[in-house]
């Protein structure tokens, strides 16, 4: 967890190709010249943090995460499983009963080897998603964030993400709402760099990058 954030090697090429084919995207990319998506944390760390942040503000999530991390400084599955015997400590850190169950279930999957991080490099995006959603508390959106921010997959397009929906409607459809199928069709023009396009669209709404 102390390693510096890693910038994807494909980022410069993706920027050039997206900007070449899309004047709107080119303008957004030019507005953020010195920032990029960065990988942070090990798989268990990243997924646990995503669970903590579900359905609450970024500020609240950071505050709760800091308290949870103080209870398990190395944020390893074994530490969390040990804490599961004293769930009141996790609840006192600000986690709901459900999120305690989710994080403990995540730790159990890692400890028992029922999910396979060592295989993910050879698996497709959909195969990784299918494996992750077997864990309680991890739905498709959380799995897609993991693909983008931990595995650095270049072509993830999380159509259920409200920020992505808002940004596409704002910049391409005069702020009029569009159907998800239309959003999917629009995103086809950004293959094979839809993760990069999504990241820049998020920046157009909030210049401060969110960590997952």
Image (spheres, rainbow, N blue to C red):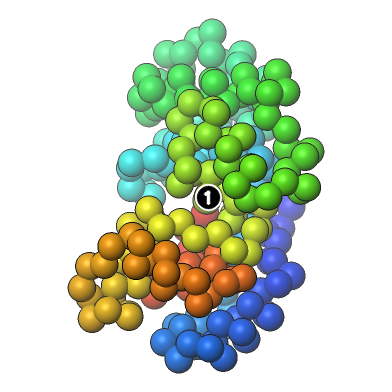
Horizontal placement of 190 versus 91: left or right?
A: right
- Look at the picture and state if 6 lies above or below 207: above
Say which residue appears at 27% left-offset and 79% top-offset.
173
Residue linked to disc 1: 144
Tell which of 89 and 28 is nearer to you.
28
Residue 128: percent from left, percent from top? 64, 42
Q: How many marks?
A: 1
**Residue extending furthest toward the top:** 85
Q: Is residue 96 above or below residue 181?
A: above
Residue at the image point whose x is 41% and y is 73% from the top: 186
Q: Residue at x 38, y 28 (%)?
A: 94
> With respect to residue 169, does 40 lie above or below?
above
Q: Position of residue 137 (x, y in %)?
A: 45, 30
Most foreground residue, 207 or 111: 111
Along the viewing direction, whichever of 24 and 95 lies nearer the viewer:
24
Q: Name above or below for residue 165 compared with residue 21.
A: above
Q: Name the image quarter holding the N terminus.
A: top right
Q: Quadrant of residue 169?
A: bottom left
User: Which residue is at a point 58% across and 38% down the rendered structure image?
Assistant: 130
Q: From the viewer's perspective, is 99 left or right of 3?
A: left
Image check: 205 left or right of 76?
left
Within-10-Å neighbours for mark 1: few <14, some 14–19, many 20+ = many
Q: At numbered mark 1, what does the secondary structure look like: helix, strand or loop?
A: helix
Q: Quadrant of residue 203?
A: bottom left
Q: Position of residue 197 (x, y in %)?
A: 51, 72
The location of residue 172, given as percent across then percent down, is 32, 80
The answer to whether residue 170 shows anywhere in this view is yes
Residue 208 visible, this angle: no
């Amino acid at each position: 967890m102390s390693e510096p954030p890693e910038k994807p090697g494909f980022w410069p090429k993706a920027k050039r190709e997206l900007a070449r084919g899309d004047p709107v995207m080119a303008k957004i990319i030019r507005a953020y010249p010195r920032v990029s998506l960065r990988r942070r944390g090990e798989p268990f760390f990243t997924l646990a943090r995503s669970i903590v942040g579900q359905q609450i503000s970024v500020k609240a999530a950071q505050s709760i995460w800091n308290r949870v991390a103080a209870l398990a400084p190395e944020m390893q599955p074994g530490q969390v499983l040990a804490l599961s015997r004293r769930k009141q400590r996790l609840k006192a850190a600000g986690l709901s009963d459900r999120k305690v169950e989710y994080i403990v279930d995540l730790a159990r999957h890692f400890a028992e080897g029922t999910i396979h991080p060592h295989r993910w490099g050879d698996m497709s995006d959909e195969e990784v998603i299918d494996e992750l959603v077997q864990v309680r508390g991890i739905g498709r959106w959380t799995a897609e964030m993991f693909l983008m921010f931990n595995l650095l997959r270049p072509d993830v397009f999380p159509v259920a993400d409200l920020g992505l929906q808002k940004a596409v409607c704002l910049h391409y459809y005069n702020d009029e709402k569009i159907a998800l199928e239309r959003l999917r069709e629009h995103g086809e023009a950004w293959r094979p760099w839809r993760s990069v396009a999504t990241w820049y669209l998020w920046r157009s709404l909030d210049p401060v990058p969110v960590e997952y």
